[in-house]
């Protein structure tokens, strides 16, 4: 820098020539002095750097000797400036080295444990593989043994079939020989008989024909007697079953009248009914298959929670039908009369080739037409009679349940008995009461 300054102030610059000093006028000694000062400064700087590098190397050697662990230090550690800026002591570095050594030992121990676990798993897998191979060999041995046994059995079976076929052939040959022998004997006897006399032969033939005819007659009589006995047994069984059915229905009718005639629960709201233009209902309030619906909001759910109407309609139809016909709203016939009529006609259906069953269906259709008339429904025409007959023929349980719900929960528009106008006005209450018109003791209890 000094040399450059002096060169810049050289005599070649005429503007500065008047201000030159002695040193400026004689630049050569000044340049030599600047170069000398620069060399001395570089020498002292290099000496300081070498001393700092020596101190760094000594500190690193002390750390390696005390810990016994050789670790490559980062580049900053080898400079004296980094040591001075870091400010960490030798003991702190030793503790760091020890921590690193412990971590390395822990990592080595974990790796050793993992290797041992892998070795154990490989050993177990090898043991399982050996066991499976042994079992597979055992299964193969068993299969081979079974194949050998099956082959032996098949051979034995084929031999047995061949022997059986041979025996059958021999038996057939013997039978044919026996037939031929009998034919020859018969021919010889016939020839001797013919030679002895034709009268004896004719008498023997007549005896044979007579015996054959008598045997056939006895067989026909036995067959007829067997058929008669089977028919009588069937009729007897049907009569016994019908009698048992009648007795059971009468007992259940008595129990029903004493234990199951309490009031029905009221409906939560009035059921909806389709009406025609004149305001008359078009059909029954409840459907024919009402207890098969899946609507939880239906009004009839309260009826089927009580279970009396559906259970007795399906299991004890004569009793539930008799309770409907003897209701104070219908008064078609008395309870016990209806029970006996329905039970007897149904019990004799098998004996009468279902004639009594058709008779009961007609009676039930007449009662259903009566319910239609009392409740203002269409009745008396060919369509309604045919529909009621088909309903009772195909699903009498559903018809009984529908009629019972209509009579027990819905009030008729007209009534079959006489009553005053005041009684009629007082009796027109809401249909939610359901069984308010039901007697405390119904006809079946009277």
Image (cartoon, grey):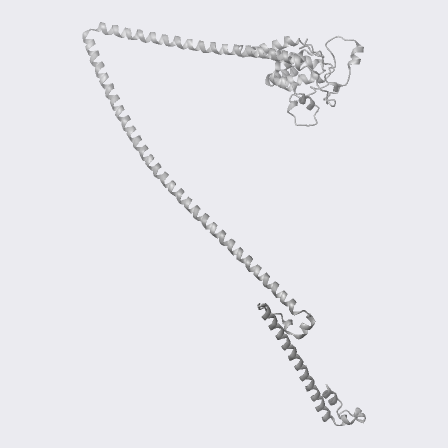
For the question of whether residue 364 can be seen, the reply is no
**Residue at x 36%, y 40% (from the top left corner):** 145
Query: Depth check: 414 or 126 in front?
Result: 126
For the question of whether residue 315 can be seen, the reply is yes
Where residue 29 sits, quadrant-wise, is bottom right
Where residue 180 sits, quadrant-wise, is top left
Q: Is residue 30 rendered to the left or right of residue 250? A: right
Q: Quadrant of the C terminus?
A: top right
Q: Is residue 272 rendered to the left or right of residue 119? A: right
Residue 339, how many percent across, how many down?
62, 10
Residue 382, how many percent across, how many down?
65, 14
Task: Please tell me whether residue 30 is drawn above or below residue 341 in the rendered image.
Answer: below
Query: Depth check: 177 or 16 in front?
Result: 16
Query: Depth check: 140 or 158 in front?
Result: 140
Query: Depth check: 283 or 399 in front?
Result: 399
**Residue at x 21%, y 16% (from the top left corner):** 184
**Residue at x 29%, y 8% (from the top left corner):** 208
Q: Is residue 68 rendered to the left or right of residue 122? A: right
Residue 434, how many percent across, how many down?
73, 18
**Residue at x 57%, y 59% (from the top left corner):** 107
Residue 336, how many percent across, how many down?
64, 9
């Amino acid at each position: 820098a000094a040399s450059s300054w002096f060169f810049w102030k050289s005599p070649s610059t005429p503007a500065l020539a008047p201000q030159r000093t002695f040193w400026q006028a004689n630049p050569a000694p000044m340049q030599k002095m600047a170069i000398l000062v620069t060399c001395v400064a570089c020498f002292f700087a290099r000496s300081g750097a070498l001393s700092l590098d020596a101190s760094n190397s000594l500190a690193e050697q002390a750390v390696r000797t005390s810990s016994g662990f050789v670790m490559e230090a980062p580049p900053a550690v080898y400079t004296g400036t980094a040591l001075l800026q870091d400010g960490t002591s030798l003991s702190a570095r030793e503790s760091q080295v020890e921590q690193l050594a412990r971590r390395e030992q822990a990592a080595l121990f974990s790796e050793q444990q993992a290797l041992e676990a892998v070795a154990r798993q490989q050993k177990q897998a090898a043991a399982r593989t050996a066991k499976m191979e042994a079992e597979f060999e055992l299964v193969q041995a068993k299969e081979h043994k079974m194949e050998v046994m099956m082959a032996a059995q098949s051979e034995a079976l084929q031999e047995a079939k061949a022997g059986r076929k041979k025996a059958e052939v021999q038996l057939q040959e013997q039978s044919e020989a026996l037939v031929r022998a009998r034919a020859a004997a018969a021919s010889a006897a016939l020839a001797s008989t013919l030679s002895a006399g034709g009268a004896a032969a004719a008498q023997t033939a007549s005896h044979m024909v007579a015996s054959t005819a008598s045997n056939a007659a006895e067989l026909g009589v036995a067959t007829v007697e067997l058929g008669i006995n089977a028919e009588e047994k069937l009729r007897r069984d049907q009569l016994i079953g019908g009698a048992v059915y009648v007795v059971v229905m009468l007992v259940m009718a008595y129990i029903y009248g004493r234990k199951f005639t309490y009031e029905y629960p009221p409906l939560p709201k009035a059921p909806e009914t389709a009406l025609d233009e004149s305001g008359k209902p078009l059909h029954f309030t409840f459907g024919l298959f009402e207890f098969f619906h899946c609507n939880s909001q239906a009004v009839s759910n309260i009826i089927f929670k009580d279970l009396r109407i559906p259970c007795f309609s399906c299991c004890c139809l004569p009793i539930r039908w008799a309770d409907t016909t003897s209701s104070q709203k219908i008064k078609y016939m008395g309870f016990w009369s209806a029970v006996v009529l329905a039970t007897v006609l149904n019990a004799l259906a098998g004996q009468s080739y279902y004639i009594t069953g058709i008779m009961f269906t007609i009676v039930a259709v007449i009662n259903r037409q009566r319910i239609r008339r009392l409740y203002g429904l269409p009745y008396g025409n060919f369509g309604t009679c045919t529909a009621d007959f088909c309903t009772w023929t195909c699903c009498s349980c559903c018809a009984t349940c529908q009629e019972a719900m209509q009579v027990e929960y819905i009030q008729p528009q007209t009534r079959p008995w006489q009553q005053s106008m005041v009684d009629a006005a007082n009796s027109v209450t809401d249909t939610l009461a359901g069984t308010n018109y039901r007697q405390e003791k119904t006809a079946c209890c009277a």
